[in-house]
Amino acid sequence: MILLVTASGGVLRYMLQNSGLGEVIGNAVSSAALPMVVVAFIVAALVRISVGSSTVAMTMAAGIIAAMPGIAELSPIYLACVTAAIAGGATVCSHFNDSGFWLVKSLVGMDEKTTLKTWTIMETLVGGTGFIVALIISIFA
């Protein structure tokens, strides 16, 4: 089951990428008047929730953000904050389409409901905290 969910996430990433979803997301968020750190988190979180894989979410979000105008002009500290925001967004909301969810569920011996109450909440807190720290640092960068 874990292998199937992981493989499906990888295939879905390529389908989304080749279908032009990255361009749609990039165009939608580039017109928003949000700090790049917030945009990076939102893009990574949306991909994470839809695909399930944090690795896929990080690589796809990094590709989208790297293609945005003005990214090369940002300071190295701000770019580090953007990277941390992508990692935070790629961590939140682990659920049924995440192979890590099923791995934790089976190794610990929990049912799906308990895994959602523990693992999913913990992952969301970790990702959200990382994003908040990155956002605070980016204000001063």
Image: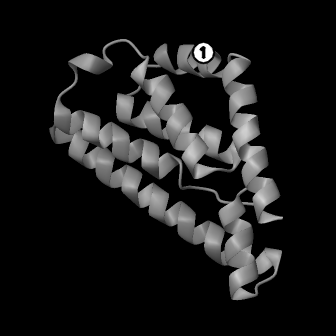
Left of 44 or right of it: where is 136? left
Q: Is residue 80 visible?
A: yes
Q: Is residue 97 visible?
A: no
Quadrant where the N terminus sits is bottom right
Residue bearing mark 1:
23
Residue drawn at x 64%, y 16% as measured from the top left = 24
Which amino acid type corresponds to the residue marked 1 in the rendered image? Glu
Residue drawn at x 70%, y 19% as measured from the top left = 18
Left of 59 or right of it: where is 139? left
Left of 17 or right of it: where is 79? left
In this picture, is 115 found above or below 58?
A: below
**97 or 31: nearer the eye?**
97
- Judged from the image, the secondary structure of the residue bearing numbered disc 1 is helix
Quadrant where the C terminus sits is top left
Q: Position of residue 65 (x, y in %)?
A: 44, 26
Q: Position of residue 34 (x, y in %)?
A: 41, 26
In this picture, is 31 found above or below 7?
A: above
In this picture, is 30 found above or below 139?
A: above
Residue drawn at x 36%, y 47% as measured from the top left = 84
Residue drawn at x 68%, y 16% as measured from the top left = 20
Q: Position of residue 124 (x, y in %)?
A: 55, 61
